[in-house]
Image (spheres, helix red, strand yellow):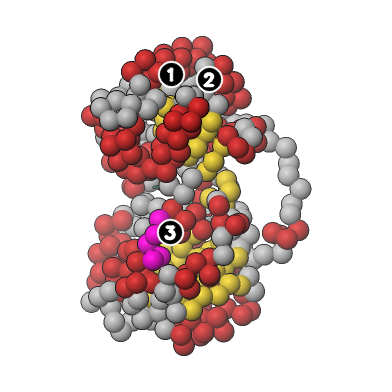
């Protein structure tokens, strides 16, 4: 296994000192070390993975230094465009090191949404015609491979990619942080979800975002029944709100509620403008804001400087509000309904999740069929 601090020190010695990316559970130890040790002016968690490639380009354009980008392979699709149409040696030729967490690696059990992406990772990397390698877990070997890749990136003026298997990085030692009293006073996401679902009643269509929230919704339905009209967006982070828009555009009677995350809503924030523009009266949006990418390790999002209700109103949502008070949820739901869609509620919740949270037991295809059957 590789010590994340050793890895970051090696990159530093090779002249790679700036980091951008979207956090990944498989790269959690590396991400935590970067978050704790790299100064904020050299580390940016971007809204989506494509933006991280673009930031690393900017870093190179101004400094001539290679930037490092990190992501989970589920975000690979988001990087292909800026890699091939900007950074590629056939276009601007911008060297950088792209570190990709390999979910769904063949032979390693993983969730359905990771299996195909994981299986075709190597041919995908091959098809890019860029230098790439798998990071060995033996430290001396890893040093050699990383040095070769960084050298290849510089010589070929090309992005180089490093594929990282599960368990490659050793867990980073982390000091026990004092619990923040302001956060501790907030409800958990799971409590807020249960209250919201109760306030919504049984007639709504619900589209839930990628990560723990969908798992919590699934468990809630297991315990209390219902849920055939829930669509769990297990992959494609950031797109739950547009799936909900596609449904609402063809569903003038029933309400469609998107249950979103702050990281997810920021990932494709432009979609809010399209929702506001399209303005289906049956569209309702609840963003569970815990300030972090909780599902992959709790790394901060940029939401702390965003006034989300103001953003929603400015792009045409008819109503937008914020609360952390679960007792007021039924009133808020009523206010959204009275205003008509599109309308948004930002629900402030506390980071964290239950460690024994289950996962959907039906296959995604079975869920899709049940969902469509329930809407007919
Ligand atoms: C395109 C893409 N990038 C990254 C991921 C990995 N991922 C899954 S959930 C998640 C965090 C979601 O954060 P947020 O929306 O704030 O919800 P929270 O987990 O905090 O409830 C990430 C980064 C993914 N599934 N898809």
Instruction: State the residue at coordinates (63%, 79%).
Output: 327
Q: Which mark is residue 150?
A: 1
Instruction: State the residue at coordinates (42%, 83%).
Output: 340
x and y, in percent, of residue 74 in the image:
37, 43
Label 2 near label 1: C-beta < 8 Å?
Answer: yes
Residue toward you, 337 or 18: 18
Mark 1, Cα crowd under 10 Å, few <14 / some 14-19 / many 20+, is many
Q: Which residue is mark 2?
A: 15
Give the mark nearest the N terminus, 1 or 2: 2
Q: Main secondary structure of the magenta part?
A: helix
x and y, in percent, of residue 111 in the image:
38, 46
Mark 2, Cα crowd under 10 Å, few <14 / some 14-19 / many 20+, is some
Q: Quadrant of residue 190?
A: bottom right
Give the mark nearest the N terminus, 2 or 3: 2
x and y, in percent, of residue 251 in the image:
28, 78
Instruction: State the residue at coordinates (28%, 34%).
Output: 84
Q: Quadrant of residue 89?
A: top left
Label 3 near label 2: C-beta < 8 Å?
Answer: no
| Cα–Cα span, label 1 and label 2 | 9 Å
């Amino acid at each position: 296994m590789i010590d994340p601090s050793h890895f970051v020190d090696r990159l530093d010695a090779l002249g790679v000192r700036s980091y951008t990316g979207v956090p990944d559970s498989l790269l959690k130890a590396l991400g935590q070390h970067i978050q704790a040790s790299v100064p904020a002016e050299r580390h940016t968690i971007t809204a989506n993975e494509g933006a991280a490639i673009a930031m690393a380009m900017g870093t190179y354009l101004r400094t001539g230094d290679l930037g490092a980008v990190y992501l989970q392979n589920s975000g690979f699709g988001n990087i292909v465009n800026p890699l091939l149409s900007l950074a590629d040696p056939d276009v601007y030729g911008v060297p950088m090191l792209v570190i990709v967490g390999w979910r769904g690696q063949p032979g390693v059990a993983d969730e359905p949404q990771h299996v195909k992406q994981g299986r075709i990772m190597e041919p995908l990397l091959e098809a890019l015609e860029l230098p790439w390698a798998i990071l060995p877990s033996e430290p001396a070997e890893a040093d050699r491979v990383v040095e070769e890749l960084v050298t290849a990136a510089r010589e070929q003026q090309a992005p180089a990619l490093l594929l990282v298997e599960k368990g490659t990085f050793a867990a980073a030692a982390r000091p026990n942080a004092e619990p923040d009293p302001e956060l501790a006073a907030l409800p958990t996401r799971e409590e807020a979800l249960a209250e919201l679902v109760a306030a919504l009643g049984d007639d709504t269509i619900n589209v839930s975002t990628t990560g723990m929230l969908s798992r919590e919704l699934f468990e809630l339905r297991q315990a209390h029944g219902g849920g055939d009209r829930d669509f769990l967006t297990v992959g494609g982070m950031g797109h739950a709100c547009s799936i909900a828009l596609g449904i609402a555009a063809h569903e003038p009677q029933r309400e469609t509620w998107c249950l979103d995350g702050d990281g997810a809503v920021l990932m494709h924030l432009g979609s809010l403008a399209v929702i506001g523009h399209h303005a289906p009266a049956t569209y309702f949006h609840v963003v569970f804001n815990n300030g972090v990418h909780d599902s992959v390790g709790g790394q901060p999002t940029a939401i702390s400087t965003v006034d989300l209700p103001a953003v929603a109103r400015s792009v045409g949502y008819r109503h937008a509000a914020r609360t952390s008070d679960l007792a007021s949820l039924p009133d808020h739901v009523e206010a959204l309904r009275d205003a008509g869609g599109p309308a948004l509620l930002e629900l402030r919740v506390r980071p964290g999740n239950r460690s024994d949270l289950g996962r959907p037991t039906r296959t995604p295809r079975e869920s899709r069929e049940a969902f469509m059957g329930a809407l007919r």
